[in-house]
Amino acid sequence: MAEQQKYLYGPVPSRRLGRSLGVDIMPFKVCTLDCVYCQLGKTTETTIERKDYVPVDAVLGELQEKLAGGPETDFITISGSGEPTLHSRLGELIDGIKKITEIPVAVITNGTLLYRQDVRADCAKADVVLPSLDAGDEQTFQKINRPHSELSLEKLLDGLCALREEFSGRLWLEVLLIEGFNTDKAQIDKIVNAVKRIRPDKIQLNTAVRPAAEPDVKKVNRAKLKVIARQFGCKCEVVADASPRRSVSSPNGKQHDELAATTEEYAEILLSMLKRRPCSLEDICTGLGMRRNEALKYINHLQRQGVIDFEQRRGTVFFKAK
Ligand code: SF4
């Protein structure tokens, strides 16, 4: 039986990156921020300490094995169940990936540590960096992103601008809008001005389409997103999936549509996983980076279609393809 994937998920369909093979290099919710829209729930303790959180050799070993199976993927995407730039060996990991494959590497980050030269140098090894900016002033930054006490919006903006100067790859900035938090005209004007300073290659507007850490987080409707997008100019696109199509859980707590997929698409990914080996609910949650209730939805979907079955082994239920 193949080893269970510990650090990889997917490849999954992504609206921003095509097919994306995810690499999760952070323990659950170790983050510099505690965003109100985080779909992983509250951050128990914010940190800015870079550490060797998970073993890079093990991640690379798993990746090498996965790629030997020849999965079709457009990007290898480094994110995490927290903030991936907190990993002190991020640069080494990207170097290692580049030795194994020519598939481009993307890093999804909240951008808060980019004020550090070592973090920028690590990120600059990637082909695409996808940072975030959700606020145009300090008060809104504190309200939405609830950062570690040593972080500030100005530090975030300085880091983003410095990365732009030093990085020759693609910089795609995500702006996540929450109704009533950062959608009034004055706030949008401030974010637009900040984006002008950063000069990203693309601006991707998103909204909170999934259950968030805080109950008062409301999504912005698509028509309004499109109107706001015009203010950011021609490099801006709406990537939020506020239509009946929906996005699925990401190991990264961002409401990123990085893993946007229909129920059908995700059920298909789950089915292919179960065809390879029987999995417990726990295995499915870990492998696909989703919460139990979400995994259960896709399991139920496949059960209704009659394509999966289950069996009990030593008190644990294992799901398997028929
Ligand atoms: S949304 Fe991302 S950056 Fe914000 S708290 Fe969650 S994991 Fe951290």
Image: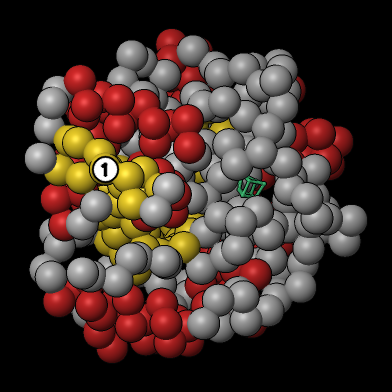
The spot of residue 83 in percent (x, y) is 61, 60
Tag 1: amino acid: Glu
Q: Is residue 188 visible?
A: no
Q: Is residue 296 above or below residue 25?
A: above
The spot of residue 69 in percent (x, y) is 13, 70
The residue located at (10%, 40%) in the rendering is: 322
Please give left or right for residue 95 compared with residue 180 in the image: left
Q: Quadrant of the N terminus?
A: bottom left
Residue on which the image places disc 1: 311
The residue closer to the viewer here, 97 or 26, is 26
In the rendered image, the residue lying farthest to the right is: 149
Please give left or right for residue 51 compared with residue 267 in the image: right
The residue located at (29%, 71%) in the rendering is: 3
The spot of residue 302 in percent (x, y) is 21, 29
Name the image colouring. Answer: secondary structure
The residue closer to the viewer here, 227 or 60, is 60
The residue located at (30%, 25%) in the rendering is: 300
The spot of residue 166 in percent (x, y) is 53, 75
SS at mark 1 in the image: strand
Mark 1 packing: few (<14 Cα in 10 Å), some, or many (20+)?
Answer: few
Task: Using the rendered view, name the quadrant where residue 71 is placed.
Answer: bottom left
The residue located at (66%, 38%) in the rendering is: 41
Q: Is residue 163 above or below residue 286?
A: below
The residue closer to the viewer here, 7 or 278, is 278
Q: Is residue 152 above or below residue 203?
A: below
Q: Is residue 14 visible?
A: yes
Task: Using the rendered view, name the quadrant where residue 139 is placed.
Answer: top right
The residue closer to the viewer here, 19 or 170, is 19
Q: Is residue 50 above or below residue 265?
A: below
